[in-house]
Amino acid sequence: MFSEEELHDMSVLQRGDDYVEVVCGCTSRRHGDAGARLRIFKSGELKIACECYHGCPEDNLSPFAFEKHAGKENNRWKHNIWVFIDGYKVPLIKTTLLKFYNMSPKNAKRPHKLVLHRDEFIKCTKCSKRRRFYRRSKNECRSYHDALANANFQCSDIPFDKFSCDDAEERASRRACKGCLRSPTCGGCTSCVCFGCEVCCFSDCDCQTCIDFRENTNA
């Protein structure tokens, strides 16, 4: 489900064939830290067993229910529920643990969830200049997808425009703008970062992201 790198320095309790269990928690000003165990299933389901006190009977909570149980009721569980990484509390939204949740059909099809794929850059192996790839459509996502898989990518390989290594690279201030609707200079958020959907994953690709998306879609 997850690579060793994705779980590096994370407090992992168990690893099964179709789930991973990690230490998690939620902090409220009134009650302090509520510790728990978060189980992430390959189907995208998330289940939390609360351990806010010894013998707490709440052992099958959804993230939303756990957030409320811990004393936080602002419905921002992706930000409020944290996991330990290298001894620090890191919000779920900043980890890779939600990739199966975000790819599951029941979550991906919510009408209010607009997934915008932000622009990405790939460095030319010949001149080391970074070239922008727009990802507003499936064709644009495919161009980036294939270029990313090309270990010897060069400026001349860009399919949507005529580029050469002689062309100037975008200024750093311009590269900081990647098209996020929430903030022009966003470094990555749920509005512009996608872990796999029908637009950016492809049935004829055997990379791990596309394989995971197909398996979750067919589950």
Image (cartoon, rainbow, N blue to C red):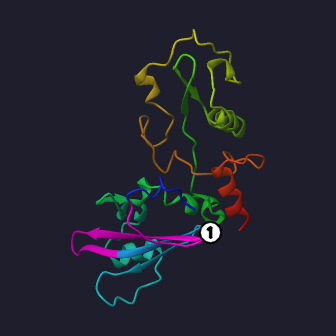
Looking at the image, residue 25 lies above or below residue 122 = below
Residue of label 1: 43
Residue at horizontal 57 percent and vertical 22 percent from the top: 125
Q: In screen coordinates, is 179 left or right of 176? A: right
- Nearer to us in this view, 87 or 159: 87
The spot of residue 172 in percent (x, y) is 41, 23
The spot of residue 194 in percent (x, y) is 56, 49
Quick one: SS at disc 1? loop
The residue stretch that appears in magenta = 10-35
Residue at horizontal 63 percent and vertical 51 percent from the top: 209
Looking at the image, residue 79 lies above or below residue 122 = below
Magenta span contains residue 33: yes
The spot of residue 185 in percent (x, y) is 41, 35
Residue at horizontal 64 percent and vertical 15 percent from the top: 163
Q: Identify the main secondary structure in magenta.
A: strand
Magenta span contains residue 108: no
Residue at horizontal 64 percent and vertical 34 percent from the top: 144
- Nearer to us in this view, 146 or 76: 146
Classify the position of the N terminus by image quarter: bottom right
Classify the position of the C terminus by image quarter: bottom right
Q: Residues within 10 Å of mark 1 (few under 14, many from 20)?
A: some
* Residue 74, image quadrant: bottom left
Callout 1, which amino acid?
Ser
Residue at the right extreme, as displayed: 204
Residue at the top extreme, as displayed: 166
- Nearer to us in this view, 65 or 51: 51
Q: In screen coordinates, is 209 left or right of 77? A: right
Q: In screen coordinates, is 26 left or right of 115? A: left
